[in-house]
């Protein structure tokens, strides 16, 4: 099966969880993961929750444009950012968990490739070399080399398959190299900038 593989991963959570009240901190991470999952709709499917990350896949129907797919993934971050801002602004609690909410962020990796569906323990799961590569792409040098904290990485395979080269023309070129895989080329965008644009649009609609 051919499709798009997406991981939305909360970062900063290890320090957040180890320096905060356990129950409160886990509740916050859970609420943020729920915020990411809430906008997910066909043709996207949630494959599973992997600790602090949501793993999804998409088999693209012919009627859906590549631009729509890309924007749908970007909206996952907007849901996360909106939830994070609401928590930060509305909390009156002085516990470490609530005080440190703003230290959390989200990174998204999107890759295109082949995968197989299997059922394990009554649950559907997907597997294959491209699934492994998608997970490995979370370990990268993007923050160090670009200075972008909340980012989206779209591999060249995705760009070609979705035919979205004009949309990523202004993004930052980025290449990672992995053992047994070699170079993986892609493009990086700042999700914080996308959220700022969407939020401004929403504010203008209210006015």
Image (spheres, rainbow, N blue to C red):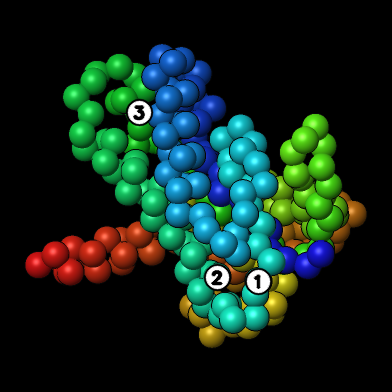
| Residue 187 placement: quadrant | bottom right
- For the question of whether residue 171 can be seen, the reply is no
Is 200 on the left or on the right of 170, as rendered?
left
Marks 3 and 1, how far apart in space?
Answer: 38 Å
| Residue 35 placement: quadrant | top left
- Mark 2 crowdedness (10 Å alpha carbons): few <14, some 14-19, many ≥20: some
| Marks 2 and 1 close (CB-CB < 8 Å) | yes
Q: Position of residue 47 (x, y in %)?
A: 67, 47
Q: Give the residue number, with chain letter if any, for mark 1.
A: 60
Res 69 label:
2
In the rendered structure, which disc, 2 or 3, sits on the residue that comes first in sequence? 2
Res 13 label:
none
SS label for mark 2: helix
User: As rendered, which of 46 and 106 lies closer to the eye?
Assistant: 46
Is 44 on the left or on the right of 196, as rendered?
right
- Mark 1 crowdedness (10 Å alpha carbons): few <14, some 14-19, many ≥20: some
Q: Position of residue 86 (x, y in %)?
A: 26, 41
Residue shown at 57% from the left, 78% from the top: 64
Residue shown at 30% from the left, 17% from the top: 95
Give the foreground label among 3 and 1.
1
Residue shown at 90% from the left, 54% from the top: 180
Residue at the farthest right position? 180
Q: Position of residue 175 (x, y in %)?
A: 69, 64
Residue at the farthest left position? 207
Marks 2 and 3, how far apart in space?
Answer: 33 Å
Marks 2 and 1, how far apart in space?
Answer: 8 Å
Q: Give the residue number, with chain letter if any, for mark 3.
A: 100
């Amino acid at each position: 099966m051919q499709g798009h593989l997406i991981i939305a991963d909360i970062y900063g959570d290890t320090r957040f969880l180890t320096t905060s009240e356990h129950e409160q901190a886990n509740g916050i991470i859970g609420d943020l993961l729920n915020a990411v999952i809430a906008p997910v709709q066909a043709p996207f499917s949630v494959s599973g929750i992997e600790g602090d990350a949501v793993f999804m896949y998409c088999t693209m129907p012919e009627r859906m444009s590549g631009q729509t797919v890309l924007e749908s993934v970007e909206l996952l971050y907007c849901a996360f950012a909106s939830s994070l801002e609401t928590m930060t602004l509305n909390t009156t609690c002085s516990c470490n968990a609530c005080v440190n909410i703003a230290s959390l962020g989200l990174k998204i990796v999107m890759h295109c490739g082949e995968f197989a569906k299997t059922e394990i323990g009554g649950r559907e799961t997907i597997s294959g070399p491209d699934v492994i590569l998608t997970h490995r792409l979370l370990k990268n040098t993007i923050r160090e080399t670009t200075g972008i904290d909340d980012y989206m990485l779209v591999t060249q395979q995705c760009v070609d398959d979705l035919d979205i080269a004009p949309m990523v023309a202004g993004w930052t070129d980025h290449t990672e190299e992995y053992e047994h895989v070699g170079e993986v080329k892609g493009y990086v965008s700042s999700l914080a900038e996308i959220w700022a644009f969407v939020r401004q649009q929403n504010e203008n609609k209210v006015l």
